[in-house]
Structure formats: structure tokens, C-alpha cells
Amino acid sequence: MKLVFERREAASRSATLATPLIALGLTILTSLILFAALGKPAGQALYSLLLEPFDGWYNISELLLKMGPLMLIAQGLAIGFRANVFNIGAEGQLIIGAICASALPVYFPEGTSPLMLPAMIVMGAVGGAVWAGLAAGLRTRFNANEILVTLMLTLIATQVLNYLLLGPWKDPHGFNFPQSVMFPDVALLPILLPGTRVNISVLAALIVSGLAYVLMRHRFSGYQLLVGGLAPRAARYAGFSEDRAVLMSLLFGGLAAGFAGACEVAGPLGQLQRSVSTGYGYSAIIVAYLGGLNPLGIVISAFLMAALFIGGDNAMVSADLPVAAVFVFQGLLLVFYLGSLTFIRHRVTFSWQGPA
Amino acid sequence: MTILAFILAGTLAAATPMLLAALGELIVERSGVLNLGIEGMMALGAAIGFVVTYQTQNPYLGFAAAALGGIALSMVFATLALALTANQVAAGLAIGVLGQGMSSLLGKPLESQTLNAPDKLGIPGLADLPVIGPLFDQDIVVYLTLALAVAIWAVLNHSKLGLIIRAVGENPSAARAVGFPVLRIRLAAIAFGGALAGMAGAYASTIYTPLWADGMIAGRGWIAVALVVFGTWQTGRIVFGALLFGALSLGGLIGQAAGVGLPSQFLASIPYIVTILMLAVISSNRRRMRLNTIASLGQPFSN
Amino acid sequence: MTPLLQLSGVSKRYGGVHANSGIDLTVDAGSIHAILGENGAGKSTLMKLIYGVEVPDEGQILWKGQPAHLSSPSDARRLGIGMVFQHFSLFETLTVVQNMALIVPGSKADLSARIRELGEAFGLSVDPRAMVHSLSVGERQRVEILRCLLLNPSLLILDEPTSVLPPQSVALLFDTLRALKDKGIAILFISHKLEEIRDLCDTATILRQGKVTAQLDPREGSARDLATLMIGRPMPPAVHPTPHGLGDQRLELTGLDYANDDPFGVSLKDISLYVRGGEILGIAGISGNGQQELAALISGEITLPASRRDVVRLMGQPVGDLGAAKRRTRRFAFVPEDRLGRGAVPDMSLADNALLTSHSRGLVQKGFIRRQAERAFTADVIARFDVRTPGPQAEAGALSGGNLQKFIMGREMMLEPEVLLVAQPTWGVDIGAASDIRQRLVAMRNEGAAILVISEEIDELFEICDRLQVLHKGRLSPSLDVATTTVDEVGTWMIGAAT
């Protein structure tokens, strides 16, 4: 038997929409088998992972809270991925963004200026952009692979965070926990839905998604990034600068991740903690792919991934699954998604003739 | 033990997991495939190796199971990258996430458990030498890894198999035209890389630090990928790079023990910082990179 | 006598395309057999079937009267079939002898000795220790032929072997092939050049649209008859430009030196040329002598430091330090040799591909893409240049080579450039489309544009150019007037023998 791939005249639209759903279905099936094999209550686990997040106002509000940073970061990353610039260090950029944003309330814990919050957001975004910009500079100036550099910068950022929380920024009255002082009210994001932890960052994420859509769909600069990703030699032929594409991609990614980091410390955390890094930066990579690297698709996939995070927390309690199960689920999702992507651009037929 | 003796004894062992994984990735990349899932395959191998060794008290079984785990995960990658011509960077990241998740899942019940480290095998005569003696008092995997490096060097440079792997990596279309089964050769290379990454993880968790802690690979898989780049795809340079990083990671430990006035987090970051600097220095020589780089690296190929 | 190779009713489909259908072919030992057909007629597919690279969907292949199972090239080699590929199947980072060792058994010393011995016997000398990337295209072809000969073949297939050779070397290759024939080796010679086939071959099988249209002795029919069998109608007439008044110098290179960073690339030395309005200057020469570097330096894909910006001038202004986009705003346009991935993005629609270079034509306003203008422009290119496609939304990768070339050529011509650079305008294009493209180039010249054509097809250059310069090992010959020069003179420059 032989698989034959035939190129379609143009990418199939229905396949484009079906792909993430097929991937989700296969992931659910595989995890059922996997969890059962590990001796966990598979049905209960899947219920907790997939349905419970939508059960009740509290769960939904937590979902919206987690959706914001995932969406923000994924939008930034997707721009780069489409330009073939692989920033996989959004986690580090998020951490540095959180650290930069925290500097103000840590040094002015009694601050009352209403400018503190906007300044924190700007510092966070700029911090993330600078951290990613290091990778951009090393790539454009020294040809250093941005995948490895952004990853190493993430490992370094984690150490910087540990250093600050165990050392100079540790809350002196915090019973020796690795965390900073609690932030003053002027350093906190306004709550969007009263009675929940949902703050206005989710609106910001939606606005950023809109901007990303306009950039990639209607702006000539977005088109240039696309060409650079699909056919680098065509971009050179047309005279689109590769250095500019690398710089733009990484700066957008870093800005968004830094912004998200600032929103975390100024939002649900209210202080700088180690748990500011819970893998959003890595999960956002999967969110970006699952959304087809398309700004609108990412809005939906961020929603799904946020549900998965909430579901993972629930499953820990109800089905005795470790947190890692969420990462297994995410990994499977990406594997199946990439596998089914082939069908968007190719028609696959089985031929029984001839030797394989 | 003096500091010098400590470094001499420890460098090789510290370098071994990175070297094993890098040697596997070298073969994968020489055949034209970029598998960025090393970190995940190492993590999975570490967990499987630890669990199996813990249950059976047989380190050989642990290594074998870890190798199989690495191969299994690498086959997921191969399905995406070869059969379905997916983007290799994304496919590598996908199995990386999957491997790390599976690793945590499998290791969870044994969190903080320990194993007995196997005995060292001193080379008679050499191990008793003054000063450099500790260099020849290592566990068996260290010796085998070094032997493997020599074997891989010989195969790549002096055998027909090596020529075929290089030919497939340089120009898969031409290789197919003269009759080499490009995809099968790449498949075998990926499996080999998976096996070595799995064993590299097992070495890290059962011999180098025989204690289970989640996330214990801590970027060493990524350093292995980087080693292949700044070894410019040459076996000898990769060995040298791995030893350098082995020494560096020991330097951090010594620094802490000696109470240098630097925060431990800075010492822990040194290998990462050096990785970035080495990448920049070596990659900036574009002519040398062009001469050594694998022409079809990361590009999908279909018959 | 049993024929050496016999194909009956062999067919091969790719998707919906019948690359070969019902092919019958008989090759006798000790003969030189031509396979004649234009681009896309199915010659390469047929050869791949005989060499075992592809497996036929239907039909039978007999070797010395026995059914042959050719499921891989190693099967073919075992039977005694050797193949010299058009784009070679050599590995640049390996030495000559390592390339041989990949498929020929034997120790290195043994192989080296046999390479020298066979090289001397058949005029194919080459240094076994040389790295392939350091060899010229002609030398690489020798390596490919030698690699086949080391396996003592009974049948040698050569796919368009003369396209990479200067005229003098073609004669030498033919001598070699005749010597091999005298040793009893059969040769399958694939070509679309009628005169060559009449010169060399005993028998010709002619393919058109995947089918055999005739098998005959090429020396008996006229070139005109062969052409009719090959393309289904007489050859389109050549379009020679007529002399007319010339404009001022539009493109000028003075003493351009370029040291290539790429160890596999070519460095250029002291390149000088100029093109005036209303003329076509041709750059002749075998590919791999600096053509790609020269084109990239003129297009701005490679830029020079500002201190040397005077070396390249467009419309009298120094532009050496300007990038490709800036040069295009100075009424320069460029059709590159590789269409997919450089001239066009395969996974983008034709409309988006139009935007690649035509964004300055009102298709972008304040940074926003104007989709309607983009589509209208694309539809215009499609209509005016007769591009066969479902419409502006079709992806470039789905077009045939000839149609995509017409699209790219059309897009660049619609920019109404004062200077047009075209590299290998008719590579892989069928004869009808090639003739169309040449006519349009001459028409543009007649309207006053300055055109620079880089091509390795000498006949094409003699047809459409006013003047020629020859590129060899990164150096450019003086200008030769087409009206007074000869193919031999150009050929002498191509092998660097002239001074």
C-alpha cells in the first residue's frame, strides 16, 4: 500500500477549520487510553479536563483570567512563526516583563501615584521586548540561532527570578517565602467582572488580537513577514529586509510576553512570585499553532487552552492526576494538529498498486 | 579530594549526558533532519530509566527501557516530519512538550527517591596515577560514550555508511536519484538519535545524580542541540564542547562549595550564558558555517 | 537479435497528469538512440522509469528479452544501466572518489586508479581527490559519466547532456559517446536540440505530450519534419530584432569586483558592461560561472558598500549600495531564473504574488494593501500575458513552469521598466511559451527599453540579442556584435580560450 499526496490548487478551507477539531478528538481518545493505562480514572479525568471548566460562573471567570496571557503571548509568537522566526523563549520574556513591572511597587510599596500601573505595564512590555531583542541582535549581528538563544535566555530569566525572590526582593515579613511584598492598590489592574478575578487585561488581549489581525491580513508590513516565512529567497528578491523581519518578529513576541507578565503580577498575583511562570510561555506556542497561526483562530485556541489549564487543576483534585498531565495533553494536541495539517494543502489517496 | 581531582573526576561524568545526546543529534542532523525534541526525549528517558532501575534494581534494564522510550518518542517525530512532511521545528517542539509531560507523569510516584550509584571502574595502572588518576576512574557508561564518539567519527569519515548519511543530508534528491532510500535512512538516523537521547536521560537520572526530581534535565537537551551547532557538525569538536560544558557545570558546584561571593543562581546560569556566547562567536563566521552546515537541514523531503 | 531494452505500453501518471502513456521503445546494443521532445513531453519521466527511480503504472520493460523488475536505481545498475542526470546527482561536499565509492564497490586506491585509466581512454580526465564543489560544470559531467562507466554498463542514459557544455566541448562529448558505442555500449541520448540529434544519433524516438509520435532515423528527415513531429506544428519563426536608433546608457557596470563569502559560490572580477535603451545585451556562458552572482549584484539582492556604489549605475545614478526594493523604484525590473521560491511564493495566490514587486503601483496605500486593486492588476497580467490559470486566487505553486514564467514576466513588464534583467528566460518552458516570451522581449526592446538577458542557450541569445558578452569563471568578455560574431567565437570565450 502506498500513500499518495497530491497538492491542492489552493489550501482547503474546510480542512483548515476541521484540522484543530480532528486534533482535539484524537487527543481526547489517546489521553483516555493513556490515563487508563496509568491506572487513573480516565473518564473522570477527561470530565475534569474538558467539561468542568465550563461548569459554573466561577470556573468560567477563571478561564477568562487565564485566557488573557495565553492569547496575548500567542498573538506575538504567531507573527514570528509565520515569518519563520522561532521565538520559543516567551516564558523568559514573560518572567523578565513581570520582574521589570514589579520593580516599581517593590521599591515604592507605599506608592499612591495613579501613574504607577501604566508605568508598570510599559516597563513590563519594554522589558520583555529587550529580552527578546537580545536574541534578535545576536541573530542579525552574529547569525546566532534564535531558537537556542531564546531558550537559553529563558533558563537565565528563571535564575534571575529565583535570585531576586530569594535575595534582595524577598518580602522581609513574608515568613521567608520566595515572594515580594504585596503591591499597593495603585499597582493593581482594575477588575472587569465584579466578584471575580477577571481584570481588564483580557480586553487588552482582545484588542491586541484585533491589531494582529489587521497587521497580518491588511498591512503591507505583515505581508512582508509572511513572504519572508514562506519563501526567504522571494523576500530577498523583492527587497524585504530579513533583519527587519527578525527584529519585528522578536520584538512583537517580547512586547506581548512582557505585557502579559506585567498583567500577571498586577492582576491575579498582586506580587512577584515564582509561580508567575507556570508555563504560559510554552503553552502559548501550542496555542499559536492550534489557532493556525491566524489571529482569529488564536482567540479560539487560547480559550480552549485556558479551559485545559483550569481542567488540569480540577483533575489534580478529582482524578488524582499530576499537573504534568496537562502538558501531556498539550503535547498530544500539537502532535495531532501538525499531523493533520498536511491534509489542508494535500489531498491524500491510498493506492494499492505497485510496491510501497 | 583536591579541587583539581574533583574536576578531573567529575568533568567526564558531567559531560556524558550532553555528549551522548549530542552524538545522537549529530547523526540525525547529518542526515538532514532537525530534531529539536532532544530535551523531551532525554526527560522521558530519565524517567523511564529511573523507574525501571528502581523497580528491577537492574541498571542495564533501565538503560534499555530508556533507549526504547527515546526511540518511541522519536518515531512520533519521524511520523510528523518524514511521513507527513510537517515543519520540523514545530514537530520537535511538540515531542519536546510531550516528552517532558510524560516524564513528570511517570516520575511523579517516585519523587525524591534515590538509587545506588553503580561502582566506578578504574583502569588498572592509570587510575592510581598521581594527579590525573581520577580521570581514569569512571563508570562504564563514560568509557562507552567516549568509545561511541570515536566510532561515530570513524563511521562518518571512513565508511560507506557515513558517506551515505552525508549524501542524504547534503542532497536528498540526488541521493534518491542514485538509489538511496532517503526516508528510510533518515528514519534510522532519527531512531538512533532517540535511543541515545533516551540513554543520555537515563545516565543523568540513574548514575550522574541518582535521585528523581521533576525537570531534572534542566536544559541539558537544548545544550546538546547547541553543541552540535557549535561543534560545526564535527565529532571531535562536539566532544571538546561537551567536556567544556561538563567542566563549566562543575565549576558552578565548586563555586558554591567554596563560597565564592557570587549568587548561586549566577553560577547555575553560566552554562546557559556560555552557550549563547559560543553560538554567537561560532555562528558569526558565516563562511565556516556554510562549509560545514548540512545543506538540506530541516527541509521536508518527499519522494 | 534480441533488443537490449524493450518497453511496451508503459504508462505513468502523476495525479491527473499522464506523464507517459502507452510508450513503446526498442533500443539495440551498440546504437545511439535519441529521445526527442520538448519540455514537458515526458522525456525525464521515461528515463526515470528505465533507471528505476519511478515505477510504471502499466506496461512492461524487457531487458535482453527478460522482464525486468526495476524498483530502484540499484536494480537498474545491477542489470547494466547507467544514467547521467541533467542536474547531476553528485554531492558537493564529497570528493570525486567518495562520490564514486557511494555506488561503486572497491577500495579508494583501486577506484582512483580506474578513474584515471578510464578518464584517459575516453577523454574524461578528472582528479579523483578533488572536492566536487570545486569542479566546473563540465568536469562534473565527466565525473557522472565516469561513475557510470566504472560499473561497466551496457546502456548509458544521458539527460540533456549538452545543455551544460560550450559548443567545443559538445564535439568532445560526442567523440566520447561514439567511442563508447564502438565498445558495444548502447546510448540513450535525451535532447530537444534537433541538429545535435541529426549529428550524433542512429535512431530517434519522438515524444509529444507523453506519447510516442514517431520512431525514425533522424538523418533522413529534415529538422523541420522533426520539429513538426515534436511540437505538432512547424517551429515558430525566430524574431530577430531589426536595427534602430539607440537611447542613452540605462545600466552600467564599471570594473565590478565581488569576492564571494560563499565557499561554493563564484567571485566576480572586473566586470564591465552597459546596456542602452532599445537594445538587448545577452550574457552567454555555462551556468555556474558567476551568472547568479552577477544577477544578484545587478538586482540589489547583493549590495556593495557605499564606497563602491558608483560601480553599478541605473539611469546614470549610482545604485550599488541600494537594495532590491530601492532599485525597483528606479524603473528596474528583474525576472529571476528560479521561479518557485524566488520569483514567486509557491503557497501564495497569484494576486499576492503580484504584490511582491508591484506594490508601488498603487496596490498599497498608507501601508494598507488594497485588495481590489491587487486583484485587478493580477487579472490584467493574466489576461495580457495569456497565463492559463483559474484566476488570481490560484496558488503560484499549482501553475506549470511555462505559465508561471509568463506570469512573472508579465508582472515585471507591467512595471514598465526602463531596464529589465531576465535570467534564463526559457528554462523548462515549452517551445510555444518560449517563443512567446522571446517575442515580448524583442517588442519591449523595440519600444525603447534596455534589456539584459542572461542565458545558457546560445541559439536563443543569437536570436534576440543585439550584442553578447560571455561570462567565464567570473570574468566577462568584451562586447561582441551579434551581426558579426559567430557561435564558434562565443564558444571560445565560453571555455576561456580567447584572449
Image (cartoon, coloured by chain):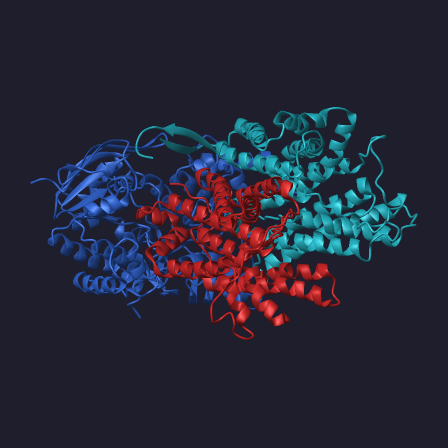
Chain colours: A cyan, B red, C blue
Where is residue A145 shown, x and y percent of the image?
57, 55
Quarter that holds the C terminus of chain A = top left
Is residue B111 among what the camera can see? yes
Q: Residue at 63% of width from left, 71% of height from top?
A: B2
Image quarter of residue C97: bottom left
Which residue is nearer to you in this view: A179 or B289? A179
Considering depth in this image, is C101 or C444 the residue closer to the camera? C101
Q: Is residue A339 above or below residue C283?
A: above
Which quadrant holds the N terminus of chain A? top left
Q: Residue furthest bottom?
A: B130
**Left or right of residue B223, residue C68 in this image:** left
Q: Is residue A40 left or right of residue C404?
A: right
Residue C392 visible to the viewer: no
How many numbered circles does the render carry?
A: 0
Q: Nearer the viewer, residue C232 or C393?
A: C393
Image coords of residue C241 (percent x, y): 35, 50
* Residue C196 placement, left or right of C494: left
| Closer to us: C3 or C386 | C3
Please state if A241 lies on the left or on the right of C103 as rendered.
right
Position in image of residue C468 (x %, y %): 35, 59
Residue at the image point whose x is 91% and y is 50% from the top: A111
Q: Position of residue B191 (x, y in %)?
A: 45, 46
Does residue C472 lie above or below C438 as drawn? below
Farthest residue, direction left: C1
